[in-house]
């Protein structure tokens, strides 16, 4: 787990406990982008429970095994559509960088989100 005083992995520069850590602790995301950033942070800190809890039931896997060797090293938001505080749906396109088994890589995805009972949930995504 990341130290609560260290910068959040999501890249916004705030300490983890004042950024994505508060969402991991139960606060709801206000926007689809905020949820996407908190999910990236969950991958970075190995919080599979948070990832499953913020995944829409219609597409959520039964379990999620994160590779402890994979290190997420950076996040860049490329575009967003909808997903604001008063929207019901939204999309966020992002690029995430990682290191695995001594090699670097990146994942670019357009993620889809929906709001259910006031809570943003990840639905699915398309990889570029």
Image (tube, grey):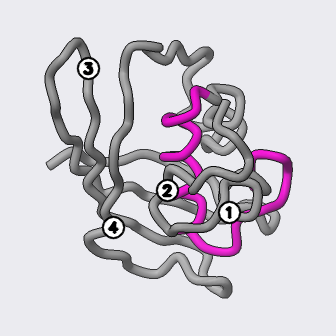
Q: Magenta span covers which residues?
A: 23-46
Query: Which residue appears at 48% of the width and 46% of the height?
Result: 40
Determine crowd level at label 1: few under 14, some 14-19, many 20+ residues with C-alpha closer than 10 A.
many
Marks 2 & 1, CB-CB < 8 Å contact: yes
Marks 4 & 3, CB-CB < 8 Å contact: no
Q: Any magenta on residue 30?
A: yes
Q: Which residue is mark 1?
A: 19
Q: Which mark is residue 77?
A: 4
Q: Secondary structure beneath disc 3?
A: strand
Determine crowd level at label 2: few under 14, some 14-19, many 20+ residues with C-alpha closer than 10 A.
many
Q: Which mark is residue 100?
A: 3
Q: Where's residue 57, x and y in %?
A: 65, 37
Q: Any magenta on residue 58?
A: no
Q: Secondary structure beneath disc 1?
A: loop
Question: Mark 4 or 3, which is nearer the eye?
Answer: 3
Q: Which mark is residue 10?
A: 2
Q: Is residue 123 above or below residue 68?
A: below
Question: Is residue 84 left or right of 67 when viewed as pictured?
Answer: right
Q: Is residue 43 above or below residue 40?
A: above
Q: Nearer the viewer, residue 60 or 39?
A: 39
Question: Mark 4 or 1, which is nearer the eye?
Answer: 1
Query: Which residue appears at 33% of the width and 50% of the height?
Result: 74
Q: CA distance from mark 3 to mark 2?
A: 19 Å
């Amino acid at each position: 787990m990341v130290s609560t005083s260290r910068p959040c992995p999501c890249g916004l520069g705030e300490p983890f406990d004042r950024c994505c850590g508060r969402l991991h602790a139960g606060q709801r995301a206000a926007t689809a982008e905020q949820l996407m950033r908190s999910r990236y942070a969950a991958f970075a800190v190995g919080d599979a429970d948070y990832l499953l809890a913020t995944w829409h039931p219609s597409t959520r896997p039964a379990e999620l095994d994160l590779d402890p060797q994979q290190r997420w090293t950076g996040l860049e938001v490329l575009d967003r559509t909808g997903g604001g505080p008063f929207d019901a749906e939204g999309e966020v396109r992002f690029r995430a960088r990682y290191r695995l088994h001594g090699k670097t890589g990146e994942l670019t995805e357009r993620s889809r989100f929906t709001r259910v009972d006031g809570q943003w949930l990840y639905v699915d995504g398309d990889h570029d």
